[in-house]
Amino acid sequence: MSFTAVIGLQWGDEGKGKIVDYLGEKHDVVVRFQGGANAGHTVSVGGREFIFHMIPSGLLRPQVTGAIAAGVAIDPDILIKEMEEVGKLSAPLEGRFWIDGRAQLVLPYHKAEDRWEEELMGGIGTTKKGIGPAYRDRYYRIGLRAVDLLSPRNLEERLRQSLDFNNQVLGARYGKPPFDFKEIHEDLREFGDRIAPFIRDVSVFLLEENRKGKHILLEGAQGSFLDINFGTYPFVTSSHTISGGASVGAGVPPRAIERIIGVTKAYTTRVGKGPFPTELKGPEGEHLREKGGEYGATTGRPRRCGWLDLVALRFSVWINGASELAITKLDSLAGTKVVKVARSYSLGGKELLYPPLDLSDWYGVQVNYVEFKGWGEISSVRRREDLPPEAKEYLDFIEDSLKIPITYISVGKEREQIIAS
Ligand code: GDP
Ligand code: IMO
Ligand code: MG
């Protein structure tokens, strides 16, 4: 028995939530392994929409067990709110949801710093959920972990150390008054009481479930080009979003992850600042934004839109070891007369099949496109062979270029609007 990972191949918002919810039918356990409430994973069932930020998207299915693994940065307020909502919408979470004691906590001063840096100093366009500062504290070894909530002494000691550091930094850089220990401490004690029954070693839990032959899905957040190492640095998030992140984030050996489903939109979007070679800045981009409803699930910000980029995808298919593709929002391109795809970039007289290393080159490349004839409405199609020939040609070209099969084609936001092969 092996694990399956669902990974975003672009700059996030590929439709991972929809694919995870769909796959949830045939999986027993769904695990978030990195990121935090910067994620916004939308699931639409029977005309009702739910946006997951903290807990795994699979939990809308009452038979699914969910887990937040060691690599996640937990936002206490959002977690509690979401646990209550999902508990009511599907089935109570007691006994079917676990939190790894190693997961880091995002604290009020992390969120404040993220906000202040963005608002006062002009940042990179983060979601302002405190992700960067929380992971910074993890690497600086002054972070608080979920397990610290179980020991009053540890909680007090670790919070004092972390707060002392953060108050000094925030005071010096932003001239803000210090955060009060007592208030944060009380809130954390209350939060600890609430989540104590859910805390355990998720890595060992996954080992046991795996031994029982359970089907386990690892749910990625963000996208490959937001990866802290392999993304368009510094316009990236602060975790490893690629499939390797699933191993270190969930506590699962790399070779146990056999199936890696790379999710891509049929075009490209990005929120926040940073390079985007195939971006459409004029009316074509606006058309895609309106047609695809491209507004951020976490922040409501309009998403930047552009054509599908095979140069970027070639790299993310490789770096993730994607064994198959799930392509979403093919329906959102319906009605577009000419659909373009980036085949390669040109830089300094050279053709590039993979993205450049240097950020200024990302901005400087010229894009070489292939054009396809558009197609009409496809949202009720349920078999690949019933798609219009133009859409089939588009998909065949993507498969041929990336040399992996497309196994899921999503043609609408609802759970059943999908072609599975
Ligand atoms: P995620 O972060 O990767 O889970 O993606 P988001 O939920 O942030 O954004 C994807 C958006 O597209 C959501 O509003 C989904 O409801 C919607 N969506 C997903 N798949 C499809 C599709 O095939 N067609 C259409 N029209 N919408 C889709
Ligand atoms: P899902 O899981 C799209 C982007 C932000 C910003 C950069 C850093 O829904 O695909 P951060 O708050 O993480 O420090 O912001 O990363 N970003 C996302 N963009 N989808 C996401 O998540 C994102 N999470 C972060 O817009 O550019
Ligand atoms: Mg999203």
Image (cartoon, rainbow, N blue to C red):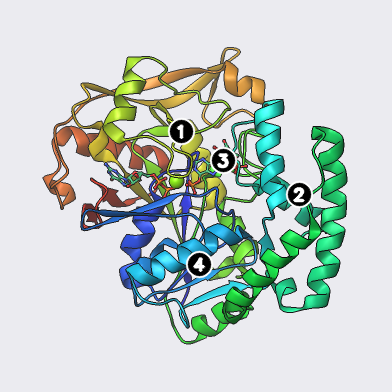
* Amino acid tagged 1: Arg
The residue at 21%/52% (across/down) is: 417
Q: Give me the disc on residue 166.
A: none
The total number of labels drawn is 4
Asked whether mark 1 and ligand 2 are closer than 8 Å, the reply comes as: yes
- Residue 334: x, y in percent? 20, 32
Which is more N-terminal, label 3 or label 2?
3
Which is more N-terminal, label 4 or label 1?
4
Q: Is residue 55 among what the camera can see?
A: no
* Amino acid tagged 3: Thr
Q: Can you tell which of label 1 and label 4 is closer to the viewer? A: 1
Q: Which residue is mark 1?
A: 301
- Residue 14: x, y in percent? 41, 44
Which is more N-terminal, label 3 or label 1?
3
Q: Give me the disc on residue 31.
A: 4
Q: Quadrant of ligand 2?
A: top right
Secondary structure state at the residue bearing disc 3: loop
How busy is the neighbourhood of tag 1: few (under 14 within 10 Å), some, or many (20 plus)?
Answer: few
Q: Can you tell which of label 2 and label 4 is closer to the viewer? A: 2
> Marks 2 and 4: CB-CB under 8 Å?
no
Q: Is residue 198 above or below residue 410?
A: below
Q: Give me the disc on residue 136.
A: 2
Q: Is residue 70 above or below residue 174?
A: below
Alpha-carbon distance for marks 3 and 4?
22 Å
- Residue 247: x, y in percent? 61, 64
Q: Can you tell which of label 1 and label 2 is closer to the viewer? A: 1
The residue at 57%/30% (across/down) is: 355
